[in-house]
């Protein structure tokens, strides 16, 4: 990591093959961090909205904070 800059948001990228648990990892991160930080989740599936819908239905974030 580089020097902290409070004026810039922290971004975490999660990559991996289909079925490797990326969305579940994101859900668990949201569950642990949402009370301490202002979070936005961005899914990057160009074919379906399935991952974003899963997060809308299962995460504590408001639907407006989940993009994808």
Image: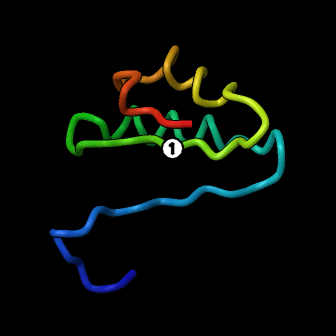
Task: Classify the position of the N terminus by image quarter.
Answer: bottom left
Tell me where residue 34 appears, x and y as whole percent: 29, 36
Q: Residue at x 57, y 36 (%)?
A: 68
**Residue at the farthest bottom position:** 3
Tell me where residue 11 appears, x and y as whole percent: 41, 61
- The image quadrant that residue 13 belongs to is bottom right
Left or right: 30 as drawn, with respect to 43: left
Tell me where residue 23 appears, x and y as whole percent: 63, 37
- The image quadrant that residue 15 belongs to is bottom right
Q: Report the residue marked by disc 1.
A: 42
Q: Is residue 55 above or below residue 22?
A: above
Q: Residue at x 58, y 42 (%)?
A: 43
Tell me where residue 31 appears, x and y as whole percent: 39, 32
Left or right: 17 as drawn, with respect to 25: right
Figure colour scheme: rainbow
User: Which residue is nearer to you in this view: 56 or 47?
Assistant: 47
User: Which residue is nearer to you in this view: 1 or 50?
Assistant: 50
Q: Is residue 58 above or below residue 8?
A: above
**Residue at the farthest top position:** 57
Q: Residue at x 73, y 43 (%)?
A: 46
Q: Residue at x 23, y 78 (%)?
A: 4
User: Which residue is nearer to you in this view: 21 or 48?
Assistant: 48
Q: Is residue 28 above or below residue 7?
A: above
**Residue at the farthest left position:** 6
- The image quadrant that residue 6 belongs to is bottom left
Query: How dense is the environment of label 1, judged by Cα within 10 Å: few (below 14), some, or many (20 and up)?
Result: some
Element at label 1: strand
């Amino acid at each position: 990591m580089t020097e902290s800059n409070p004026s810039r948001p922290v971004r975490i990228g999660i990559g991996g093959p289909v079925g490797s648990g990326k969305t579940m990892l994101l859900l668990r991160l949201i569950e642990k961090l949402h009370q301490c930080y202002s979070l936005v989740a961005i899914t990057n599936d160009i074919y379906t909205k399935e991952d974003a819908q899963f997060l809308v239905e299962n995460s504590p974030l408001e639907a407006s904070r989940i993009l994808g």
